[in-house]
């Protein structure tokens, strides 16, 4: 089964305790597969133990992309978390390991 990194690249970021994940297909022809298989529910399940709140997905078909807003995902956020690296940008590789 292919992994997400075979078909897309990812940018992640954070705002407080919210993780923002943006995925973009390398090829426009692969966008429908990403849209069908990378749901908010699957991303939340893939990041279980990290994302504790709801996940909202936004489709960006003009750029073959998906954006996810994941609430309660960074142990309180950069300024309040006791974790070593609670920045959202550190999670892009974890997202790209998702099997699709």
Image (cartoon, rainbow, N blue to C red):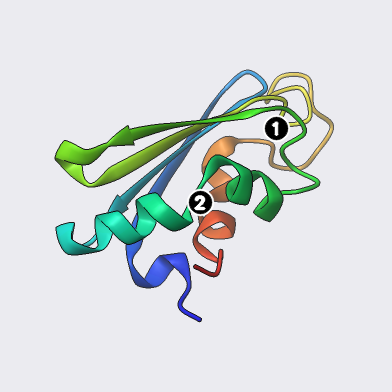
The disc, 2 or 1, on the residue closer to the chain's N-terminal end is 1
Task: State whether residue 80 is above or below residue 63.
Answer: above
Locate residue 73, reporting x and y percent.
70, 32
| Mark 2, other Cα within 10 Å: few <14 / some 14–19 / many ≥20 | some
Q: Secondary structure at mark 1?
A: loop
Which one is in front, 89 or 29?
A: 29
Locate residue 47, reporting x and y percent.
68, 49
Task: State whether residue 79 is above or below residue 89.
Answer: above
State if disc 1 and disc 2 touch (CB < 8 Å).
Answer: no
Left or right placement of residue 6 versus residue 51 in this view: left
Left or right placement of residue 87 versus residue 21 in this view: right
To which residue does mark 1 refer?
A: 73
Left or right placement of residue 83 versus residue 68 in this view: right
| Mark 1, other Cα within 10 Å: few <14 / some 14–19 / many ≥20 | many
Which residue is painted at 41% across and 67% down in the image?
5
Locate residue 2, reporting x and y percent.
45, 78
Locate residue 26, reporting x and y percent.
23, 61
Which one is in front, 45 or 6?
A: 45
Which residue is painted at 37% across and 56% down in the image?
34
Which residue is painted at 74% across and 42% down in the image?
50
Q: Secondary structure at mark 2?
A: helix
To which residue does mark 2 refer?
A: 92
* Count of numbered marks: 2
Task: Report the Cα–Cα distance between label 2 and label 1.
Answer: 13 Å
Residue furthest out toward the right: 82
Which one is in front, 6 or 28?
A: 28
């Amino acid at each position: 089964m292919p992994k997400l990194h075979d078909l897309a690249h990812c940018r992640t970021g954070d705002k407080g305790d919210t993780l923002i994940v943006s995925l973009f297909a390398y090829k426009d022809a692969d966008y429908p597969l990403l849209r069908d298989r990378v749901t908010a529910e699957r991303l939340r399940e893939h990041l279980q133990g990290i994302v504790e709140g709801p996940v909202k997905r936004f489709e960006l078909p003009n750029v073959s992309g998906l954006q996810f807003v994941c609430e309660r995902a960074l142990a309180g956020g950069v300024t309040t978390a006791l974790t070593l690296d609670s920045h959202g940008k550190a999670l892009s590789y974890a997202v790209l390991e998702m099997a699709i």
